[in-house]
Image (spheres, rainbow, N blue to C red):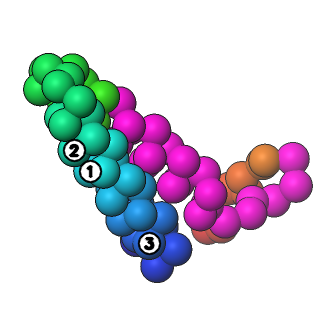
């Protein structure tokens, strides 16, 4: 795992915890908080991977392995 990926993911998890605590203080059902947390974790992982992936070759092609 790259350093920037980890930092991005930790920051997103801190955001999720803050939103979950705020929802709890507003009286939202724990079931819906859990559903929201699961969805946000998925979005966070997808965003972190997209932001931190290396640039590939132009055109998105992958070269075949060399023998």
Residue where numbered disc 2 is placed: 21
State the image coordinates of residue 48 (x, y, percent, origin top left): 51, 55
Contact between marks 1 and 2 (CB within 8 A): the answer is yes
Locate residue 67: give its quadrant.
Answer: bottom right
The residues colored magenta run 39-59
Q: Which of marks 1 and 3 is nearer the N terminus?
A: 3
- Residue identified by numbered label 1: 17
Give residue 39's position: percent from left, percent from top: 35, 30
Separation (CA) of disc 3 from disc 2: 21 Å
Q: Residue at x 26, y 50 (%)?
A: 17
User: Badge 1: how crowded within 10 Å, few (<14), some, or many (20+)?
Assistant: few
Q: Name the residue under label 3.
A: 7
Report the Cα–Cα distance between label 1 and label 3.
15 Å
4 w.r.t. 18: above or below: below
Q: Can residue 33 be seen in this view?
A: no
> Residue at horizontal 19%, vertical 37%?
25
The residue closer to the viewer here, 31 or 9, is: 31
């Amino acid at each position: 795992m790259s350093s920037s990926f980890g930092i991005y993911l930790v920051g997103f998890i801190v955001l999720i915890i803050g939103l979950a605590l705020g929802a709890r203080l507003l009286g939202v059902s724990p079931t819906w908080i859990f559903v929201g947390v699961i969805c946000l974790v998925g979005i966070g992982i997808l965003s972190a991977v997209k932001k931190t992936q290396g640039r590939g070759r132009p055109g998105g092609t992958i070269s075949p392995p060399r023998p």
